[in-house]
Amino acid sequence: MLSPAREPGSTRHQTCPACRHGLAIDLLSIRRAPVLVCSVFPDADAARATPGGEIELVACQACGFLYNRVFDLAMALAGAGYESTQSASATFNAFADGLAKDWIARHDLAGKTVIEVGCGQSAFMLALLANGVGHMHGIDPLAAMSDIPADYADRVSIDASDFHARHVDYQAAALVCRHSIEHIPDVAAFMTLCSAWSKANGNAPVLFEAPAAERIVHDGAFWDLFYEHCNYFTVAALATAFEQAGMRVTQRRLEYGEQYIIMDACHDADATVISDAAAQAAWLSACLNFGSRASAAVSACQRRMRDYAAAPGGLAIWQGASKTVGLLTAVGDALPIRCCIDQNTRRHGWFIPPSGLQILPPAALAQMQPAHVVLMNAVYLREVREQLDAMGCTATQLHAIDDVIAA
Ligand SMILES: [Zn+2]
């Protein structure tokens, strides 16, 4: 939740926030998306009373970047302070640890100082330090030294603010930014700051991770559309945003079941925008079909989940966070789902919007013995199946959401 231009109020974009092109294609509208998808509430009524914001998802005809044309930053900022860590999952921890090792090795960061913009509760800063980085400087309005264990405290400094022009001269060997760019309304201004920082540090690497829009569009994954995410990048659109800010992309790939873009770049005085007209046309064609595919996916979900919920033992959803909120926003909250399950102990006992479902620990399923569990992220299929079997839920059918929407 950081922005170089943190102006409250609705920002109806007249041009693409990444490339400033004026023409965009309408994809999908969601009238009342909860503005606090990662927040939890002490009771069901409070969760159901969460305000809703409007999403008008459009695709830029020039760079293929997807954005919410009517995003209101003030509404999104109302959710600041939410609980959003994914660190409770062993799979996610292993992925983040591997990424830390990869960046340290490829950019020779051992023993050096690294900046993380949007460091949140500092989990990735700790992963970088544990793998050999010398010192971390975290920049994030939500960051706090109280999140840093005592044995790391002398190797961490924190600036609890947005990324700002005054940070450009901060000396470091790399700038890391994970899962932040999707929250920033003025992408071009943010990228310009990153480029200026790289230039001021001898063309030091700028290392990004962001959710990938390719899978959302190709799979009709409507549950991954969130109010807080005003931006959705493809690999090509993120590369274009770097290049237009005067950076050269040195590494690009999809990871984590193709859900995340990993991209390395650095300032380059000779950087140019590299475009592929045929790939761009194919992408815009897929975007045009996204609306109808998403509608079909919602219908399939409503039908199958109604059947699951009616079976003896009923239905639970595995994940008590943003994807479940996105799913239930779209399919409606009239289904008698028993609960949602989450590994994160800090969310247990709380309630999610807009459905008012309670979040329970995995162990709650041992007594509940649900007939069906819908898993919001197929990456965890093996991990969750093993947990279900270990607690005696061997008869429980486990379905990845990707299979539920397959008509
Ligand atoms: Zn654009």
Image (cartoon, grey):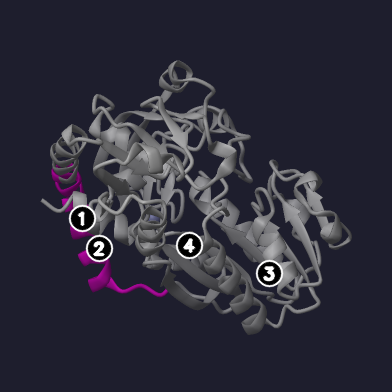
Q: Quadrant of the N terminus?
A: top right
Could you give the CA–CA distance between mark 3 and mark 4, rounded to whole angstroms? 15 Å
On screen, residue 74 above or below 192: above
Q: Estimate the x, y position of residue 99 in percent, counting from the top left.
A: 57, 72
Counting residues from the start of the chain, the first of labels 2 and 3 encountered is 3
Location of mark 2 (residue): 283
Q: Which residue is mark 4?
A: 241
Which circle's residue, 3 or 1, is located before the other in the chain?
A: 3
Q: Which residues are magenta?
A: 274-296
Residue drawn where x is 78% and y is 52% of the image: 148
Q: Amino acid at mark 3?
A: Ser
Magenta: predominant secondary structure element? helix
**Which one is earlier in the sequence, the residue at label 3 or at label 4?**
3
Q: Is residue 89 left or right of residue 157?
A: left
Mark 2 touching mark 3, by CB under 8 A? no
Examine the image and state in which quarter residue 29 appears: top left
Of callouts 1 and 4, which one flags the residue occurring earlier in the amino acid sequence?
Answer: 4
Instruction: Report, in whole angstroms, how far the alpha carbon at label 2 lies from the one at label 3.
Output: 30 Å
Asked whether residue 294 is drawn in magenta, I would say yes
SS at circle 3: helix
Of badges 1 and 2, the one in the foreground is 1
Q: What residue is pinned by disc 3?
A: 198
- Crowding at label 1, few (<14), some or many (≥20) Cα neighbours within 10 Å? few
Q: Residue at x 46, y 54 (%)?
A: 18
Count neighbours of disc 2 (C-alpha within 10 A) and say few if under 14, some if 14 to 19, many if 20 or more: many
Q: Residue at x 75, y 59 (%)?
A: 168
Disc 4 under 8 Å from ligand 1? The reply is: no
Q: Nearer the viewer, mark 4 or mark 2?
A: 2
Sequence-wise, the earlier of marks 1 and 2 is 2
